[in-house]
Image (cartoon, grey):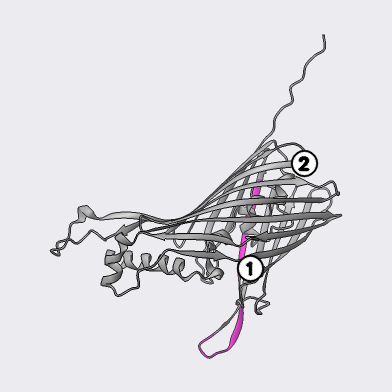
Amino acid sequence: MKLSNLFFTTLTLLTQTAFAQAPKYSNEFLSIGVGGRGLGMSNAQTASVNDASSAFWNPAGLSLVKGSVQAMGMHSEYFAGIAKYEYLGLVAKVDATRALAFSFIRFAVDDIPDTTELIDASGNIDYDKLKSFSAADYAFMLSYAVQSKIAGLRYGGSVKVIHRTAGDFAHSWGFGLDLGAQYDRGNWQFGLMGKDITTTFNAWTFNTDKIAGVFSTTDNEIPKNSTELTLPKLILGAGYKINIGKKFSVLPEIDFDMTFDGQRNVVISSNPISVDPHLGLEIGYDNFIFLRGGVNNIQQVKDQEGAKSTIFQPNMGIGIKLRNLTIDYALTNIGSQETLYSNVFSLKLDIYKHKATTEKK
């Protein structure tokens, strides 16, 4: 593919996504998930999550962090390394029942060729003017969680600021709010998560001075400043932890993603509410090693002859806990039904403060 074609194709996709204002597909990078545990369990985390990644899955789980401070980081690559996905999370316990967290997410395609100045007015090619830019999505989240006075009940929320850029050509700022709750009763674990409960707004601004020439030459409509909406989503989760002897544990969880933006190609498809179930399983040994798996993206597709079949996406992973350090790995992708899987690694570190002791004289 020529550099000019690659540049124009990328820019067209970016501007069409922003200008379309389609709630179904806005801020989709925030639907991928964070952490090797969550991705290995096919995003079934709403009821059982209890670490720094709770800020994303269900902020109520932050109150269960064991250490005084917990740090978590993740890196993964998608589409054969074209897209980079990073996550950083930091949790600080305010006291035994409350926690405060900050999270950062970046999903980006870097080093996209910028050929707008490659050819001058006389038709000469000057490779010294060949530049590059990044199409990047950022999310900054501030979260708070507290354990209720009701035994087993906890709740929390996340305020998020979203920044999306396409080099110097376009950018947007958005704001949203997530709320979540968890409840334990015996071996049962329940979770409720409301994402973008107030509707998340992204205000897009386009630098028409840089793109007007390219769009006019190719007979494309020059985009205008616009607002993109992300409608609320409700997630219900339930899990059951089974202890086998003193060392083995089994935790299955099923989550139901409920969307309210029209009919989708999911298991329960209706208008305006659609329900997308996903199932995860974690098997642990001695709180040291964990095997994980799950299925999601269950859809019906038609072949060339019109016959329908059901497809789904399997995921798997493993986790190892070494004292205060946890290493999680997942083999997953972000929804493509092709076998283009990615390796996801995340690290989690718990820091405990030692109480100072004084001797009475």
> Does residue 131 lie above or below 295 as drawn?
above
Taking the spot 26% from the left edge, 61% from the top edge, the residue there is 116
Question: Quadrant of the image for the N terminus?
Answer: bottom left
**CA distance separating discs 2 and 1:** 33 Å
Q: Amino acid at mark 1?
A: Asn
The residue mark sitting in front, 2 or 1, is 2
Q: Earlier in the sequence, mark 2 or mark 1?
A: 2
Chain part drawn in magenta: 303-320
- The residue tagged 2 is 97
Horizontal side of 122 relative to 192 (left or right) equals left
Q: Position of residue 325 (x, y in %)?
A: 64, 40
Q: Residues within 10 Å of mark 2 (few under 14, many from 20)?
A: some
Task: Name the one closer to the observer, 205 or 250.
Answer: 205
Q: Is residue 262 in view from this perspective?
A: yes
Task: Check disc 1 and report the residue beneath it.
Answer: 296
Above or below, 287 against 219 in this view is above
Furthest residue to the bottom? 305
Q: Position of residue 142 (x, y in %)?
A: 61, 46
- Asked if residue 317 can be seen in this view, the reply is no
Question: Residue 44 got which mark?
Answer: none
